[in-house]
Structure formats: C-alpha cells, structure tokens
C-alpha cells in the first residue's frame, strides 16, 4: 500500500521506484475514476514565465474539483515578506502549494515551513513534474522503461538532473553529452548513482562531451534549451559554446531506428533541435506536453 497523502515533490528522489510506477499508473486513469476534492484550493506561484506548467496545473486542478489560484512575483514573496510569513499565510487558504522559482533552496525553505504539500513546478536545479510526464510518455511509446537507453544532449541543467534521477529510479541507461563547462552538478550525478545502487534498479550513467557517443543506439533522445530561464544574458555565448550539440537528422540517425525524440519545450528551433527532428514521426513532444496534465493531476490526487 502506498502512502502519498501530504507529501512534497521537490526532485523525484523522494519517490521509490515502486511509487514512481504507481504515479504513472494513476496518470493513465480516466479523470472520472479519480476522487474529487470539492472545496479545496491550490496556490500556484510562478516566479518565472510558464505556458505548459501553468495551464496544465490549472486544468488538472479543475478536473479534480480543486480551485486554482495563480500568483506571480507581484503577489507572493513581494514587499520583502519572508518565506516563513508568506507560507504561514497561504496555508490558511490553500490545500496545496505549487511553486516555480529560481534557487532550489527557495522551494526547500517553502517546504520546510508548509504544512500542506508542496510541488516543484521547476527550479534552477530540478523539474520533477516534467520528469514524471516524460517517463509516462516514454512508457507509453516504448512499452516499458527498464533497460532503455536515454541520451540527453545539451546543457547539464535542471532537465539533465531530472533525467539522472528519473533514470536511476526507472532502471534506465542514461547517457549525457554536455559541452565542457556545462556538465550536470556533481551532486545530482552522485545522487543518481546512490539511488540506483540503493534500489538495485540496474540503471547506468555515462557522462561525456560527445553527442554521437551518447546517442549511439539510444531508445530515447532528449534535449533542452541551451539558455534556461534566468540565463537570457548568456544566450549569445551559449550559442557559440553549444555549437555541434544540435539534435539534427544526422545525430538522430545514430540512435536506434525506433527511437523517440523528447523535448520539454519551449524549443528553440535551429538551436538545440532542427525543424526536421522536432517535426518528424519520431518526435513525441506534444504527447509529452499533454502528459504534464495527466502526471500532475495524478500527483495532486495522491497527495490530497
Ligand atoms: N516544459 C515546461 O515546463 O514548460 P513551461 O515553461 O511553458 O511551463
Ligand atoms: N531548462 C529550462 C526548462 C524549461 C521548461 C529552463 O529552466 O528554462
């Protein structure tokens, strides 16, 4: 029996492999089979822009009978109000808090103070909701997760960290190719290795700078923007530093013939991925975007 009530979702590492599989199972359930939470409210705080996360959380809340209240930097954590005071106020109104912010320590502090469940809607270091949606998408298209080779090409960012942890729990072979100086955080790699060993999932990890080596025989090829939110001013430098890391048809040709292509979106066509790849039959990016809704609705229904 799984116990999810009241739990936070900050990185995916909070989940056991078994719990992760259960969340994906619940995500496949029709809305009509899920409980309703009439009278409950969710506080959704966005300190950064969002299309998919905001809309999928709002729709997911409505499907569960939960009233969503969206706030921006003008509303929450404004006027020098402390994190403590902000959360102590919010939890008197809402049954769940969803936060997209910059430093991961910010959401950790929120979770420390909150007596209601907190969901990470993206920090500089992790994007667990996207991780759930991506695993669901891969499972739907490939039938299972265990033993698949997932190649991530690009920046060692919040998505790279999320794939390391997701792969560790799901028993995947995760191969990363990042330019020198853009490696994932050592702590995230270490955590992934520790989780894989702890649960004995059989996951493996390889890190390097060669996209061809990473993508060779991959079942899943993934990339993400080269300049994440908050790094806008580095865009020109990053375009130079990431030369050769575009996922194009030649690179996709190195993957398994039945490989799928994922991207959390928004995509920067012509930079990290070409039109030909993202518009190809191998691309499942819009299923992936849809699955944000199903995965988050599942998680909210479990923790509520
Ligand atoms: N993938 C994702 O999180 O999209 P948004 O930034 O639009 O929410
Ligand atoms: N790495 C990207 C993901 C966007 C969904 C960012 O943080 O901007």
Image (cartoon, rainbow, N blue to C red):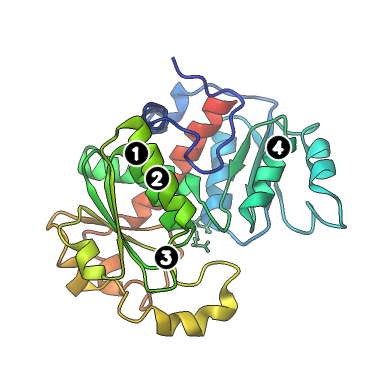
Q: Are marks 4 and 3 in contact (CB under 8 Å)?
A: no
Q: Are marks 2 and 1 in contact (CB under 8 Å)?
A: yes
Q: Which residue is mark 3?
A: 183
Q: Which mark is residue 196?
A: 1
Q: What kind of element bears circle 2?
A: helix
Q: What kind of element bears circle 3?
A: loop
> Is residue 279 rendered to the left or right of residue 265?
left
Q: CA distance from mark 4 to mark 3?
A: 29 Å
Whichever of labels 1 and 4 marks the residue nearer the N terminus, that label is: 4
Q: What kind of element bears circle 1?
A: helix
Q: Which residue is mark 4?
A: 112
Q: Are marks 3 and 1 in contact (CB under 8 Å)?
A: no
Whichever of labels 4 and 2 marks the residue nearer the N terminus, that label is: 4
Q: What kind of element bears circle 4?
A: helix
Q: Where does the image place residue 160, in percent across and percent down from the top left?
A: 41, 57
User: Which residue appears at 46% of the width and 29% of the height?
Assistant: 31
Q: CA distance from mark 1 to mark 4?
A: 26 Å
Mark 4 CB near ligand 2 (8 Å cut): no
């Amino acid at each position: 029996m799984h116990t999810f009530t009241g739990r936070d979702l900050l990185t995916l590492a909070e989940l056991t492999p078994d719990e992760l599989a259960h969340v994906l199972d619940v995500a496949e359930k029709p809305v009509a089979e899920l409980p309703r939470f009439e009278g409950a409210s969710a506080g959704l705080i966005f300190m950064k822009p969002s299309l998919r996360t905001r809309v999928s959380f709002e729709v997911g809340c409505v499907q569960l009978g939960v009233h969503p209240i969206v706030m921006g930097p003008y509303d929450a954590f404004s006027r020098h109000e402390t994190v403590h005071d902000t959360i102590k106020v919010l939890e008197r109104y809402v049954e769940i808090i969803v936060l997209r912010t910059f430093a991961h320590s910010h959401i950790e502090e929120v979770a420390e103070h909150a007596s209601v469940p907190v969901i990470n809607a993206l920090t500089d270091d992790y994007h667990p909701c996207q991780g759930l949606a991506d695993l669901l998408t891969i499972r739907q298209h490939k039938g299972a997760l265990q033993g698949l080779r997932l190649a991530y090409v690009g920046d060692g960012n919040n998505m790279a960290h999320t794939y390391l942890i997701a792969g560790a729990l799901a028993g995947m072979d995760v191969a990363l190719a990042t330019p020198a100086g853009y490696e994932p955080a050592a702590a995230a790699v270490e955590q992934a290795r520790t989780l894989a060993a702890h649960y004995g999932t059989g996951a493996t990890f390889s890190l390097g700078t060669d996209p061809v080596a990473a993508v060779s025989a991959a079942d899943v090829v993934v990339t993400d923007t080269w300049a994440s939110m908050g790094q806008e001013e580095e865009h020109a430098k990053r375009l130079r530093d990431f030369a050769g890391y575009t996922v194009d048809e030649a690179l996709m040709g190195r993957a398994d013939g039945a490989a799928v292509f994922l991207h959390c979106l928004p995509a920067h066509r012509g930079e990290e991925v070409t039109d030909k790849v993202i518009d190809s039959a191998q691309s499942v990016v819009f299923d992936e975007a849809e699955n944000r809704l199903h995965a988050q609705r599942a998680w909210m229904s479990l923790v509520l």
